[in-house]
Image (tube, rainbow, N blue to C red):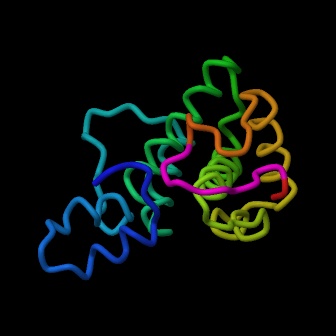
Amino acid sequence: MGAPFSRHDLEQALTSESVDVTVYKLLLGRLYMKPHKNATLDAVETSLVDGMPKAQFGLLEQTRALMLWRHYSRHDDNPDLDMAPAWAAAIEQIVANLNGHHLSTDRAAQMYEVAEAAVEERRMTLVTALAIRDQDERYTVFDTTPAISDQ
C-alpha cells in the first residue's frame, strides 16, 4: 500500500477478499487496541484512548492525537488536567479535521460531555501553541485538503 492513501481507499479494501483485513481495521479504528497495563497515561490521554476508537478513529489517528497532546504537554509544563475531557475533545477535533473528517466544535463537545466554549478555547490554545497549520504533517495520516482554521 503506497502512501498517500485515503480513508475511502481503505474502506474499499475491506471488501476485498485478497487482503489481510486486520491492517485495514487497525487503520480505520475497527480494531480496538488496549494500552499496556503498565502504560502511564494522564487523564487527557486516557480520554483519547477511550473515546477515539468509539468514533472509529484508526490507530494512526489515535497515535497522532496522543502525539499532539504530548507535544503540547512539553510546551506547557502544567496543563490543567481538571479539564481533561475538554482537552481531549479539542485534540480529537483537530486530528479529525486534519484528516478529512468534519468534526464541529459542538459535536466534539457533545461526545466528551463538555461545554462548547471550553473545547473552542483549548482548540485555539493548541493551534496557537503548536503552530498547527492546514495539512500539518505532524498530525495528518490521510491525503486530504482540510482547513483547520475554518473549524
Horizontal side, residue 65 vs residue 77: left or right: left
Q: Residue at x 37, y 52 (%)?
A: 59
* Quadrant location of the N terminus in the rendered image: bottom left
Query: Residue at the location (42% across, 63% down)?
Result: 53
Question: Up-down: is 56 above or below 85?
Answer: below
Q: Which residues are magenta?
A: 140-149
* 145 drawn magenta: yes
Q: Is residue 142 above or below residue 73?
A: below
> At x 70% / y 28%, what residue is drawn?
79
**Front residue of 92 and 148:** 148
Quarter location, residue 70: top right
- x, y percent for residue 85: 64, 52
- In the image, taking residue 55 as reference, residue 147 lies left or right, namely right
The x, y position of residue 88, in whole percent, is: 62, 49
Q: Is residue 114 left or right of residue 135?
A: right
- Nearer to me, 95 or 116: 95
